[in-house]
Amino acid sequence: MADIEVTRAHGKSVEEARKIAERLVAQLSEEFDFKHRWEGDTLKFERSGVHGQLAITPRDLQISAKLGLLLKPLKGRIEKEIQVTLDQQLA
């Protein structure tokens, strides 16, 4: 089960949502320094201590992440940063 789960309706086409996801990942990657790759409409990301995915559905962007033991104390900060950045990208 994921430690962090965030879902937001995007109200866009899948292609537009993918562009939003790419901007989101670029912004979060600068702060959290993770590697990422696309598998269809799902963006997989990972770094030491965290791995997860951002799935694009026709209606939503769904982010889930599993945190390692050392990052669990930062769960609130990481989750908040994901929420704020995602909301900014969808605005």
Image: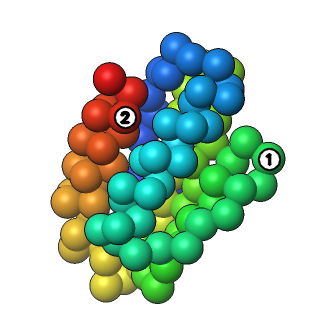
What residue do we see at 46% from left, 46% from top? 23
- Residue drawn at point x = 52 percent, y = 14 percent: 11
Q: Residues within 10 Å of mark 2 (few under 14, many from 20)?
A: some
Badge 1 element: loop
Q: Percent from the top left, x then y, of residue 32?
A: 35, 71
Residue named by callout 1:
40
Residue 10 vs residue 79: left or right? right
Q: Can you tell which quarter of the image residue 27 is in?
A: bottom left
Q: Amino acid at mark 1?
A: Gly
Q: Amino acid at mark 2?
A: Gln
Which image quarter holds the C terminus?
top left
Q: Residues within 10 Å of mark 1 (few under 14, many from 20)?
A: few
How far across and how far down the image is residue 47, in percent? 49, 79
Residue 42 seen by the camera? yes
For the residues labelled 1 and 2, the Cα–Cα distance comes to: 21 Å
Question: Which circle, 1 or 2, is nearer the viewer?
Answer: 2
Q: Quadrant of the N terminus?
A: bottom right
Left or right, 30 with reference to 43: left
Q: Is residue 90 left or right of residue 51?
A: left
- The residue furthest right is 40
* Relative depth, front residue between 49 and 88: 88
For the residue pair 41 and 77, the one nearer the viewer reads as 41
Residue at (73% x, 42% y) in the render: 41
Identity of the residue drawn at 22% across and 69% down:
74
State the residue position of label 2.
89
Work out whether 47 lies above or below 19.
below
